[in-house]
Image (cartoon, rainbow, N blue to C red):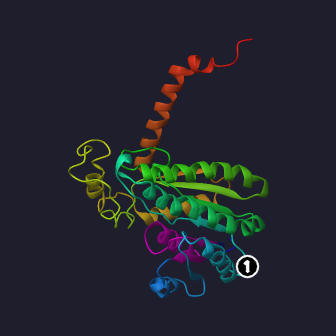
């Protein structure tokens, strides 16, 4: 198999770093992005001559195109796989989260992804490559206290569904990767990104227990990110890659529960809600 050329946003740690390591381990070439270049030498030492780093904060609109162009240059002019991984979350009840909280998370998780995707598309059309968008089970199932993050990932999923239809004519595939509980540094800054306190009317209620949920979750995640990376590579290589790749045993139950609830509501209201046309 010919070596593939990857561009992955956010490789400082977590899922982005593991996908990069897995691709390098099988002989592929990877450019990863960092906001803080202090890790550049460490990451490039993973596979000298095949592992590269460029500086990019996906919030920086002016830097996105130059970063992608620099990456493609390092990859010899060809890009096969673009992985949109960079992201973060703010947590708390809707009533406690500010408009700025929503804007900040959407800027990174959604608009940053759009900018990187648009910059990479001319190269991906040429290679008939693939876009891999890191979503989450939170992009399909809402959870009290996670509305900011949910909103950003639901947006990514809607965008990806439309994008997949648009790019099919060019032979470019889109894949959503929706992990459940995998160990990463994603919640490291949760104390700074939590919008709830003990005096809140939501304390002890859905949406108000998100801090306790995160505290009990961090450090006990059942998912191994290296195994997630292996699944992603297997799906990328598949003759018929999935559009939506759920990863982690827990997410299947969560998604199925939502599908069952939607089906129940549809069945209960189909007759009444369908009878809305003009009388003839």
Position of residue 133 measured from the top left corner of the image (x, y, whole percent): 57, 59
Q: Quadrant of residue 219?
A: bottom left
Position of residue 108 measured from the top left corner of the image (x, y, whole percent): 51, 64
For this view, does 80 lie left or right of residue 253?
A: right
Q: Residue at x 59, y 58 (%)?
A: 235
The answer to if 36 sits in the magenta stretch is no
Residue 170 shows in this picture = yes
Query: Which quarter of the figure is the C terminus placed in?
Result: top right
* Residue farthest along the left direction in this orientation: 198
Q: Residue at x 58, y 17 (%)?
A: 271
Position of residue 162 measured from the top left corner of the image (x, y, whole percent): 67, 49
For this view, does 258 lie left or right of residue 273?
A: left
Near-viewer residue (6 or 9):
9
Q: Is residue 186 above or below residue 196?
A: below
Q: Residue at x 52, y 68 (%)?
A: 19
Magenta stretch bounds: 6-34
Position of residue 122 measured from the top left corner of the image (x, y, whole percent): 75, 67
Q: Residue at x 47, y 32 (%)?
A: 260
* Residue farthest along the front direction in this orientation: 99
Near-viewer residue (34 or 48):
34
Q: Is residue 122 above or below residue 265?
A: below
Q: Is residue 17 above or below residue 157?
A: below
For this view, does 179 lie left or right of residue 23?
A: left
The answer to if 7 sits in the magenta stretch is yes
Near-viewer residue (207 or 25):
207
Report the residue marked by disc 1.
77
Q: Secondary structure at mark 1?
A: loop
């Amino acid at each position: 198999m010919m070596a593939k050329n990857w561009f992955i946003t956010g490789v400082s740690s977590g899922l982005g770093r593991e996908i990069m390591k897995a691709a390098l381990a099988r002989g592929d070439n990877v450019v990863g992005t960092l906001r803080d270049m202090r890790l550049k030498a460490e990451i490039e030492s993973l596979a000298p001559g095949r592992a590269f780093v460029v500086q990019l904060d996906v919030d920086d609109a002016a830097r996105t195109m130059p970063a992608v162009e620099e990456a493609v240059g390092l990859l010899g002019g060809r890009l096969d796989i673009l992985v949109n991984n960079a992201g973060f979350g703010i947590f708390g009840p809707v009533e406690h989260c500010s408009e700025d909280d929503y804007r900040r998370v959407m800027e990174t998780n959604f608009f940053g992804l759009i900018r990187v995707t648009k910059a990479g598309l001319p190269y991906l059309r040429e290679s008939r490559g693939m876009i891999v968008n890191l979503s989450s089970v939170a992009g399909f199932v809402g959870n009290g206290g996670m509305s900011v993050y949910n909103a950003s990932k639901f947006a990514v999923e809607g965008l990806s569904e439309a994008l997949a239809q648009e790019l099919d004519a060019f032979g470019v595939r889109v894949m959503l990767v929706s992990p459940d509980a995998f160990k990463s540094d994603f919640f490291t800054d949760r104390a700074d990104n939590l919008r709830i306190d003990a005096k809140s009317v939501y304390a002890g209620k859905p949406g108000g227990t998100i801090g306790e949920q995160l505290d009990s979750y961090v450090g006990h995640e059942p998912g191994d990110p290296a195994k997630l990376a292996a699944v992603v590579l297997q799906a990328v290589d598949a003759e018929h890659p999935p559009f939506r790749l759920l990863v982690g045993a827990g997410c299947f139950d969560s998604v199925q529960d939502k599908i069952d609830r939607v089906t129940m509501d549809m069945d209960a209201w189909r007759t009444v809600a369908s009878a809305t046309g003009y009388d003839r």
